[in-house]
Image (cartoon, rainbow, N blue to C red):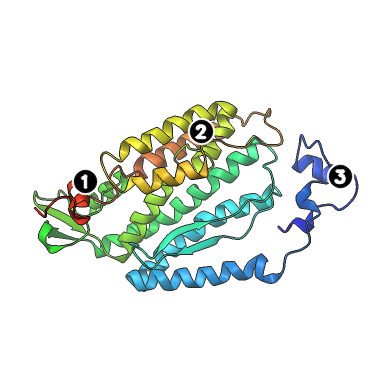
Amino acid sequence: MTSSSFPPSSAPTQEWLRAFPGTSYWPPPWATEPKPSAWKAWGRNVLLFVLTAASVYLSGGPLLVMGLMSILFAHEMGHYLACRYYRVDATLPFFIPFPLFSLVGTLGAFIRIKSPFPSRKALFDIGIAGPLAGFAVCLPVLALSVREMTIGRVDPSSGGLYLGDPLLLKLVTWLALGSIPDGSTVVIGALGLASWFGLFMTALNLMPIGQLDGGHVVYALLGRRAEIVSRVGWWVCVCLIYFSPSWILWAILIRVLGRQHPSTLNDYEPVGRARVLVALLGLVIFIVSFVPSPIVGSWEQVLELFGVLPPS
């Protein structure tokens, strides 16, 4: 919904008060903004979607495009449609192409929310909608990826990339292939890589920090006490650097984005028991999707790469 869709009158309507309880000023600043051009409204989003699809295609082919872009699109549209439902002004998804130094050709996608959240209920629903939608699409992609899976020998000298397995992927590979012999590993195809990245991004977004999706959920449940959880979550990210150097970038990014969460227009309305149960579902999804060491590697390998240590 564009900002020009809000009521232009000098006093809030009943519809507005129902959508934004607790609003103490009128008109809100985003209600008087001019209607954006087609380029700003959707043109940039379409261009970035095409560029990202092309970047993903170059990284892994058409199956990776279909699997991964479906997961990312579902995730972001979950947020966007929830924003439309609660009349929160938000952009269409911005996809991020990243053809260089990227495993799958993209860094994901995001939407920009341009107006305050009307209540903690709305904040909860908007925050959790993305991970739930993305995870729902990730499940069939993961199921289809089983047909591509094979068992190969572990050969560090071959130069292949070894990925850490989330619990859900371990369960699926065990059901499909049985126990993996010592010295062997599961070789995944394009759909397997799409589902792995989809699970990884779902877990990252569900971390209860700042304005990540998990941060939205925790603030909706705990209010300002969520800042304590956010601080602890960030320090957990810092501790994970010990296990995998790949967490350095994520810890820095979270620090830049901030660990605090802005208040909603109505911070006093409780979210209700039903949303607590949905939050527990989100916690289960986080647990089965989380990867402590996304890219298997050691600090010795990093130091060797930069010439600090001699090659082993």
- Residue most extreme to the front: 308
Identify the disc placed on residue 284.
Answer: none
Q: Is residue 83 above or below residue 160?
A: above
Q: Give the x, y percent position of residue 187.
A: 20, 60
Task: Give, as a three-letter code, the residue at label 3.
Answer: Thr
Q: Is residue 274 visible?
A: no
Lower sequence index among marks 1 and 3: 3
Which one is nearer the viewer's eye here, 12 or 272? 12
- Disc 1 to disc 3, C-alpha distance: 60 Å
| 161 lies left or right of 101 | left
Q: Could you tell me which secondary element the residue under label 1 belongs to?
A: helix
Lower sequence index among marks 2 and 1: 2
Quarter-of-image position of residue 140: bottom left
Lower sequence index among marks 3 and 2: 3
Q: Is residue 145 visible?
A: yes
Q: Give the x, y percent position of residue 294.
A: 30, 49
Task: Give, as a three-letter code, the residue at label 2.
Answer: Leu
Task: Give, as a three-letter code, the residue at label 1.
Answer: Trp
Identify residue for label 1: 299
Circle 2 residues within 10 Å: few <14, some 14–19, many ≥20: few
Residue at x 89% of width, y 44% of height: 11
Identify the disc placed on residue 277.
Answer: 2
Q: Could you tell me which secondary element the residue under label 3 belongs to?
A: loop
Answer whether labels 3 and 2 touch (C-beta < 8 Å): no
Q: Give the x, y percent position of residue 40.
A: 66, 66
| 257 lies left or right of 176 | right
Q: Could you tell me which secondary element the residue under label 2 belongs to?
A: helix
- Disc 2 to disc 1, C-alpha distance: 40 Å
Identify residue for label 3: 13
Quarter of the figure that contains the N terminus: bottom right
